[in-house]
Image: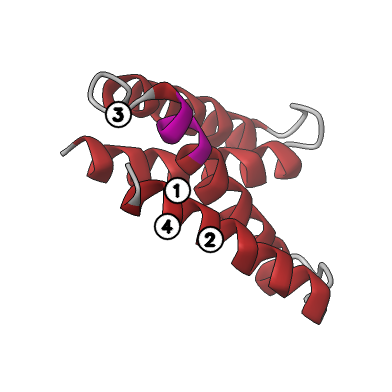
């Protein structure tokens, strides 16, 4: 169950990161509200997962999911570059996250 919560918390990290960008420095109400709720849920989930998963592994997986998710949203929806070197770097992050889970 801890791993499921950790993955959901990582996805919520993507949500709050994108909402933070869209909040325009906390000047837009709806994205700011989404940011706050997603941040709280993401942190609560991370805290819950770390009761069973070592902190180094849990935090790295959480950040990795959030980073890859945020970069993917940036490329697919926000017009950021999807160059081959960027995609390879994201693949390396995913490989690291999977490796941390497999060799836990």
Label 2 – label 1 distance at C-alpha: 14 Å
The answer to whether the residue labelled 1 contacts the one labelled 4, judged by CB atoms less than 8 Å apart, is no
Which segment did they paint magenta? 56-60
Drawn side of residue 76 relative to residue 44, left or right: right
User: Which image quadrant: the N terminus?
Assistant: top left
Label 1 – label 4 distance at C-alpha: 15 Å
Q: Can the viewer see residue 84?
A: yes
Residue of label 2: 94
The answer to whether the residue labelled 2 contacts the one labelled 4, judged by CB atoms less than 8 Å apart, is yes
Q: Position of residue 66 (x, y in %)?
A: 55, 46
Label 2 – label 4 distance at C-alpha: 6 Å
Drawn side of residue 56 relative to residue 4, left or right: right
Drawn side of residue 28 relative to residue 6, left or right: right
Residue of label 1: 11
Residue at left offset 51%, top offset 50%: 65
Secondary structure of residue under mark 4: helix
Secondary structure of residue under mark 2: helix
Q: Quadrant of residue 54?
A: top left
């Amino acid at each position: 169950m801890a791993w499921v919560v950790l993955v959901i918390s990582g996805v919520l990290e993507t949500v709050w990161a994108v909402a933070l960008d869209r909040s325009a420095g906390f000047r837009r109400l709806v994205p700011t509200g989404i940011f706050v709720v997603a941040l709280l849920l993401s942190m609560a989930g991370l805290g819950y997962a770390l009761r069973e998963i070592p902190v180094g592994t849990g935090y790295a997986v959480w950040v990795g999911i959030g980073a890859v998710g945020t970069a993917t949203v940036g490329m697919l929806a926000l017009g950021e570059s999807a160059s081959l070197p960027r995609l390879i770097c994201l693949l390396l992050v995913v490989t690291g996250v999977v490796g941390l889970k497999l060799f836990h």
